[in-house]
Image: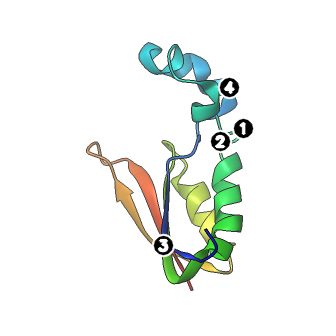
Amino acid sequence: IDRPFDAILANPPYVLDHARPALQPEVRDHEPAVALFGGIDGMGLLNRLAAEAPSRLRSGGYLILEFGLGQDVEIEDLFEQAPELTLTGVRRDLQGIARVAIAQRV
């Protein structure tokens, strides 16, 4: 596709590599590792998305991505350092845990 997108939606791997034992067995034992683990800090692909998405988004377009339990501070820091993206919101799951970041290309 040779034109910018209005939105990029992503559920990238964000689980910390060393957190495998803490995962629920139905996840740990049946999901492919490539779909779960995001590196030592879990932020590998999240960092890449924040860096590369602006070149694929139209002005005003959105990057919406899921992130892991306890990564909300890192997500806020990530978008504070992303010159072309502004964090416009964080959505919480049914347990009140921050899980989805919404950023807009400026």
What residue does disc 1 label? Answer: 39
Select label 4 or label 3 by which is in front: 3
C-alpha gap between disc 4 and disc 3: 31 Å
The reply to whether callout 3 and callout 1 are in contact (CB within 8 Å) is no
Say left or right for 20 vs 64: right
Question: Which residue does the image show at 52% across and 13% down from the upper left?
Answer: 29
C-alpha gap between disc 2 and disc 3: 22 Å
In this orientation, does residue 56 appear?
yes
- Mark linked to residue 60: none
C-alpha gap between disc 2 and disc 4: 10 Å
Q: Please, what secondary structure does the residue beneath circle 4 have?
A: helix
What residue does disc 2 label? Answer: 42
Q: Position of residue 103 (x, y in %)?
A: 50, 71
Q: Amino acid at mark 2?
A: Gly
Q: Residue furthest front?
A: 1
Question: Which residue does the image show at 50% across and 22% down from the upper left?
Answer: 23
C-alpha gap between disc 1 and disc 4: 9 Å
Question: Which residue does the image show at 50% across and 47% down from the upper left?
Answer: 11
Q: Amino acid at mark 1?
A: Gly
Name the one closer to the observer, 43 or 49: 49
Select label 3 or label 1 by which is in front: 3
What residue does disc 3 label? Answer: 62
The reply to whether callout 4 and callout 3 are in contact (CB within 8 Å) is no
Select label 2 or label 3 by which is in front: 3
Q: Please, what secondary structure does the residue beneath circle 1 have?
A: loop
The reply to whether callout 2 and callout 3 are in contact (CB within 8 Å) is no
Q: Earlier in the sequence, mark 2 or mark 3?
A: 2
What residue does disc 4 label? Answer: 18
The reply to whether callout 1 and callout 4 are in contact (CB within 8 Å) is no
Q: Amino acid at mark 4?
A: His
Q: Quadrant of the N terminus?
A: bottom right
Q: Quadrant of the C terminus?
A: bottom right
